[in-house]
Amino acid sequence: MAFAPFIRRSVRVGLMSAKILIWETPVSKTSMSKTFALPLMAAVLTASAAAPALAPGVAYADASEPAAQQIENFDAALIRTMKTDGGTHARYKSISSAVESTFDIPVMLAFAVGPAWTSAAADDKAALISAFRKFTIANYAKNFDGYDGQKITVDPTVMTRLPDKVVRTTMTGGGTNVVLGYRMRQSGGAWKVIDVLYNGAISQLTTQRSDFSATIASGGVKALIAKLDAQTDKLLKS
């Protein structure tokens, strides 16, 4: 999921001429993209034991694998959000805690911003983390805007790439078939998403870093904060 430079950037996949949109991923009854990669983190819900009953659209993996459990909880929250009535703001409220609990926003942002992150003032870092968090939540709220029988299956085989793990999921139904890989790393005793891979190859963070660099080069970190805030407002108003 990336933008234009944040919202509508397309990339070519391998030797094929097909394109995919990064970050802008409509998933609705009326308009379902068959190719997407989103930004892109799910809540470790207090009532996780009840998740299967709450989210029949999620197929569960080995309950003993904590990284997979984290993604299962996020997928359950995503399915519930897709079923939420009341527009983008209602979906934003529905998915916000899941994003905050599942994704390691500061780690992702530090990589996406690059060298400018190290030299940024503490206040600017805090503002950028807040802007990126809101932007990420708004993307999910905007793009996953309708449920049409979609099902998310978590691959029971979790790949280990020390110090990280990769949990793979597949969304099917409603005219789509999308494979995402969540690269995860332990943080504070929990497994958190630090990157999202489309078809196991296209890195969200690498794409973001390329996109962010132009804005930072022309206006610094403050310009990126303003850009993210403006994109968030646009997503929530549309």
Image: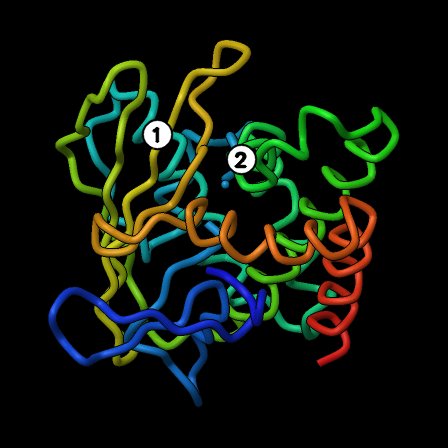
Residue lying furthest front in this view?
Answer: 218
Q: Residue at x 40, y 72 (%)?
A: 21
Q: Which amino acid does the dot numbered 1 rest on? A: Gln
Nearer to the camera, 216 or 6: 216
Q: Which residue is mark 2?
A: 108
Within 10 Å of the Cα at label 1, are there few (<14), some (14-19), or many (20+) other Cα atoms? many
Residue 201 at what x, y percent from top left?
23, 50
Secondary structure of the residue carrying numbered label 2:
helix
Residue 127 at what x, y percent from top left?
82, 39
Secondary structure of the residue carrying numbered label 1:
helix
Residue lying furthest right in this view?
Answer: 123
Nearest to viewer (mark 1 / mark 2) = 2
Residue 233 at what x, y percent from top left?
79, 68
Residue 213 left/right relative to 61: right
When the figure is inspected, residue 100 is found, relative to residue 5, above or below; the finding is above
Q: Residue at x 35, y 43 (%)?
A: 52
Q: Earlier in the sequence, mark 1 or mark 2?
A: 1
Within 10 Å of the Cα at label 2, are there few (<14), some (14-19), or many (20+) other Cα atoms? many
Q: Which residue is mark 1?
A: 69
Q: Which amino acid does the dot numbered 2 rest on? A: Met
User: Which of the 4 image quadrants contains residue 25?
Assistant: bottom left
Nearer to the camera, 46 or 121: 121
Which label belongs to residue 220? none
Q: Residue at x 18, y 80 (%)?
A: 17
Q: How far apart are the two marked residues, 1 and 2, measured between alpha carbons? A: 21 Å
Residue lying furthest bottom in this view?
Answer: 30
Nearer to the camera, 43 or 209: 209
